[in-house]
């Protein structure tokens, strides 16, 4: 495996990344909560982009993968700032943002903040506002009490052997970055991909996002039987198609 390069952000965080040169609009992959840039989708899309002669960037948020920092010290605003630094420093011109799960939320924040740097958006089981609408809404009164008093709780995960640490700061920072409470106006094509067998992001989230986004070319594709990972050959091909459609 090739060693990643490192980018130091304005906040002093060191982000690990892999960048492939090519023609634009380039593609920037934004990973999910507690995931890293070595996952199936990121690696597959990098290979595909190279074959297409397209520039491609994948990176780890701080506290994720090979980047600096501790996961339990980070929050949505930090990871959005990481993504912004990567976009501004490591790419040139408008990019196609491909956001998986939490990365879909990050992509929306980037597109809202830097519209001139975005050529198109692809959301893969996008999970905007999940800290509020999924985590906090799903916590018991005891969990909420422990979170607010102790500052952190642990929850089980289907994607890791050890539980996730959820902090009070994660929840409170998430509230400052909510995107589904008002219309989202984008002047670029948008594609949303959602599996009907996704146990992490409910179909209602995709429908709510479809309702909130205002764009000249917006489509939601529902894939019967697809789960949250979207990493089968068939679903990976759908991501490729979506990228081509928004370019």
Image: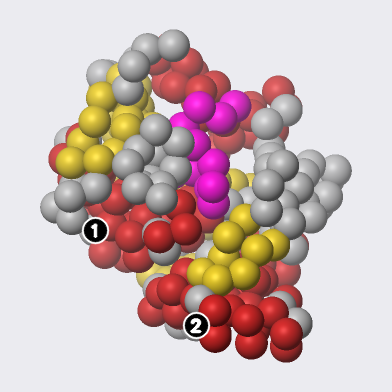
Residue positioned 24% across, 47% down in the render: 13
CA distance separating discs 1 and 2: 20 Å
Residue 42 at what x, y percent from top left? 50, 30
Q: Is residue 246 left or right of residue 137?
A: left
Pick whichever, 3 or 231, lies toward us.
3
Magenta span includes 238: no
Q: Which mark is on residue 208?
A: none
- Residue 104 in sight here: no
- Vertical order, 103 against 49 (above or below): below
Residue positioned 72% across, 52% down in the render: 157
Secondary structure at badge 2 equals loop
The earlier-in-sequence mark between 1 and 2 is 1
Name the residue beneath numbered marker 1: 114
Secondary structure at badge 1 equals loop
Q: Quadrant of residue 203?
A: bottom right
Q: Which mark is on residue 181?
A: 2
Q: Which residues are magenta?
A: 30-40
How many numbered marks appear? 2
Magenta span includes 38: yes
- Vertical order, 44 against 172 (above or below): above
Q: Quadrant of the C terminus?
A: top left
Pick whichever, 195 or 178, lies toward us.
178
Q: Is residue 1 left or right of residue 124?
A: left
Secondary structure that dominates the magenta span = loop
């Amino acid at each position: 495996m090739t060693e990643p390069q490192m980018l130091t952000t304005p906040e002093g965080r060191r982000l690990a990344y892999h960048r492939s040169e090519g023609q634009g609009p380039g593609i920037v992959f934004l990973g999910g909560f507690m995931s890293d840039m070595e996952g199936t989708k990121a690696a597959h899309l990098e290979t595909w982009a190279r074959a297409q002669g397209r520039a491609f960037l994948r990176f780890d948020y701080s506290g994720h993968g090979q980047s600096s920092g501790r996961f339990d010290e980070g929050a949505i605003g930090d990871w959005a700032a990481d993504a912004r630094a990567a976009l501004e420093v490591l790419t040139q011109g408008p990019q196609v943002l491909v956001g998986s799960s939490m990365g879909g939320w990050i992509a929306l924040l980037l597109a809202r903040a830097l519209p001139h740097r975005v050529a198109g958006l692809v959301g893969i089981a996008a999970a905007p506002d999940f800290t509020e609408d999924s985590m906090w809404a799903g916590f018991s009164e005891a969990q909420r009490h422990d979170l607010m008093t102790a500052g952190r709780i642990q929850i089980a995960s289907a994607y890791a052997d050890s539980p996730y640490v959820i902090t009070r700061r994660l929840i409170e920072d998430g509230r400052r970055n909510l995107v589904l409470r008002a219309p989202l106006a984008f002047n670029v094509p948008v594609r949303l991909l959602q599996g009907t067998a996704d146990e992490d992001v409910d179909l209602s989230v995709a429908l709510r996002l479809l309702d909130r986004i205002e764009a000249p070319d917006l489509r939601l594709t529902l894939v019967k039987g697809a789960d949250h990972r979207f990493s089968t050959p068939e679903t990976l091909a759908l991501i490729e198609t979506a990228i081509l459609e928004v370019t």
